[in-house]
Amino acid sequence: MIEFFKITLFIPLYNLLLFITNTMPHGDLGLAIIILTILIKIVIFPLYAKSIYTQIKLKSVESKLKEIKEKYKKDLNEQSRKIMEVYRQEKINPLSGFLVLFIQLPVIITLFYVFKDSFVLRPDLIYEFTPTPEKISTNFFGLVDLTLNHNYIFAVLAGSAQYLQTKLSLPPRKRKDENKSANPKSFSEDLARSMDLQMRYMMPVLMVFVAFSFPVAISFYWITSSLFSAIYETFLIKKLRLKLENSQVKNQIPVFKGSN
């Protein structure tokens, strides 16, 4: 398993980072991480767009789900079955919004191993076609050493960026009085609510502790990734909502008019 991880993730990412660093002014590793982050975001963009589209579709079927919950409030098994039937008909995976985050975990783990003993040249890991930088600067513009641990400023920035990105990507939460109901929550609702809470609040806090323990390079990657996501999410959500509205109007399906 370790050897598989090394061959499929660690070595390719290490060489890609070397290649990018070789093209950066003064071999600036910080700039290389920014470029690497953007490349990764481009690669996973189709999955990311799909997860956002799913979140919007969930809002569009909200009234239908509410009717099902009211109609089958005394039969939770049938209620869950009907809800899952709606998900299947609309091709909705209620947990797909969290997929992109978990896809990035192997990248973070790989970066940790790349930087854990400082970023040093490893001739045994370098491909023959990978150009070796004459100089590698681990100090981003001379301001911070990306190989050091326990930088609380970058740790807090990483957690804040994660919170901002999550806030933009997930649908707004209902107010407490709207959540109160005499109907018991189904298993799927409880699971979705639990995941929602973890994504909104626990993940940013966890990111602060993880970023503080890891090299600054991990924080730097996560800050760049989250801010990049937040920027294009602002435009992506509007575009995908318009696409869904046009599709539903064409098929005469009621659509949720969410706030931007």
Image (cartoon, rainbow, N blue to C red):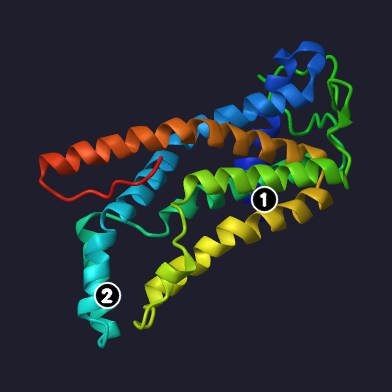
Figure quadrant of the C terminus: top left
Outermost residue on the bottom side: it is 74
- Cα separation, mark 2 vs mark 1, equals 49 Å
Residue tagged by mark 2?
69
| Residue 197 at x, y percent in the picture | 55, 63
Of 36 and 135, nearer the camera is: 36
Q: Is residue 237 at all visible to an observer of this figure?
A: yes
Residue 201: quarter of image: bottom right
As shown in the figure, which amino acid type bears the numbered disc 1?
A: Glu
Which residue is rendered at x = 64% and y = 61% of the image?
Answer: 202
Is 91 drawn above or below residue 194 in the view shown? Answer: above
Residue tagged by mark 1?
3
Is 38 drawn above or below residue 182 in the view shown? Answer: above
Which residue is rendered at x = 44% and y = 74% of the image?
Answer: 190
| Residue 158 at x, y percent in the picture | 72, 43
Figure quadrant of the N terminus: bottom right
| Residue 164 as seen in the image, left or right of residue 19 | left
Which residue is rendered at x = 78% and y = 33% of the image?
Answer: 124
* Label 2: element kind: helix
Q: Is residue 6 at all visible to an observer of this figure?
A: no
As shown in the figure, which amino acid type bears the numbered disc 2?
A: Lys
